[in-house]
Amino acid sequence: MDVERESTRSNMSDKPISVLMFSSAIVRAGAEEHMLELLRGLDRRLFRLHLACPDVLLKQYGNDIPKDVYVTPIMLEHLSDIRGAVRLARTLRQQKIDILHSHMFRASLLASPVGKLCGVPVIIETTHVRETWRTGWFKSKFFVDRAVGHLIDRYIAVSEANSRYLVEQKRIPGKKVSVIQNGCSMERVDPSKAHPQGIRESLGFSKDDLVLIVMARLEPQKGHRILLQALSLLQSEFPSIRLICLGSGALKDELSKMTRDLGLENTVRFVGFQANVGDWLAAADISVLPSFYEGLSLAAVETLAAGIPFIATAVDGTPEVVIDGETGLLVPPGDPAALADAIGRLARQPELRRKFALAGRDWVLKRFTIQRQIEQTSSLYLSEWLRQTSSNAQSLREETVSSERV
């Protein structure tokens, strides 16, 4: 990598490559944390970084965006958002963007055509997740995806499962797809780090309670309903079991009502979005993620990195992080009884919790560090930029020779 960097720096004449991250999201979640980590970690000697996204997301990021990142508020949610498209085009041209990197298909659908029209040399899409909402004859055939795919130079899949989805279901050419698994900052969730005391007590929990945590948006995808049903099955055997729901979302009122209906008012706490996930993980004994689908869950990586035993559903990229019986437990999605059995198993066996905690952190340190993710993303940026600029230069030379012959 060092040789590649020096070679690239020479070809660039010390001018950094200008990269713009684009998102149309209005909620800060896993994909948005992924994007933020890239903005924090990419080498400033190689890249000049820009962020374009809705103002509501910028407000949620707050001061977490590095000060040297160029920020442009852009609302571009639909093909009819002409004003947002014009603003994006103006930004791409004025900032002389070399690489346009959109996160999620919807953002790419809107931004990639604008990037191509503006002559951006490299256009990249990270899909992040399998799109289960793509139902019906037309949407499930992915005609639009493949049409827009002609404008995209490279796809980043966040897991091997995500790559299979792109190639086998969307029928994106495999040569365009690169797997770069999600990583997390080990320092952010370091179990040896001192964390604030009193989180349990502030929620009305005692030090002897068995505290579960679910770090996920309150949306149907994440399976909170299944987890609440599982907890209701465990109440008689484990009356001191407790749950922290870390995240916000559309199901807040429905899940609160379900909590009351199941008699879990003293068991469950909804604390909203919290950026300091390491502190909250340190307050928990077990982490749970009952999702129906994922790309490669950042919550799974962060949990294992924090040395917390983990239970998750065996969906998409999650088994790449959670090795059943070795770094955690996997259960089928949508099965409250199976989830309750897994929670009960860890509740009864503290030695198994310790085993998973040690093995999980070791696994993440080897495979899922943020440094690894940033290095791989940087290499992809450099190789694609060099390939595209070399190709353009060759085309220009051929056109010049052809015109001279004429």
Image (cartoon, rainbow, N blue to C red):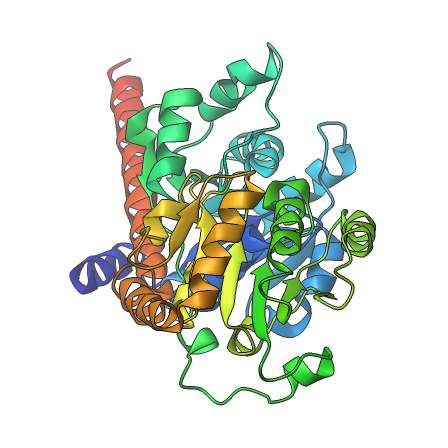
Q: Residue at point 37% right, 43% down? A: 159
Picture layout, residue 256 above or below residue 175: below
Residue 170 lies, in percent from the top left, at: 44, 22
Q: Residue at point 42% right, 60% down? A: 301
Front-most of residues 122 and 184: 184
Picture layout, residue 45 above or below residue 336: below
Q: Residue at point 60% right, 77% down? A: 209
Front-most of residues 107 and 91: 107
Residue 233 lies, in percent from the top left, at: 62, 52
> Would residue 249 be found to the left or right of residue 101 on screen?
right
Total tally of numbered discs in the picture: 0
Front-most of residues 13 and 214: 214
Q: Can you say which quadrant of the picture contains the C terminus?
A: top left
Residue 355 lies, in percent from the top left, at: 31, 69
> Residue at the left extreme?
3
Q: Residue at point 44% right, 86% down? A: 193
Residue 35 in sight in this render: no
Q: Can you say which quadrant of the picture contains the N terminus?
A: bottom left
Q: Give the image quarter of residue 75.
A: top right
Residue 40 lies, in percent from the top left, at: 48, 68
> Residue at the top extreme?
137
Q: Give the image quarter of residue 317.
A: top left
> Would residue 170 be found to the left or right of residue 265 on screen?
left
Residue 369 in sight in this render: yes
Picture layout, residue 252 above or below residue 316: below
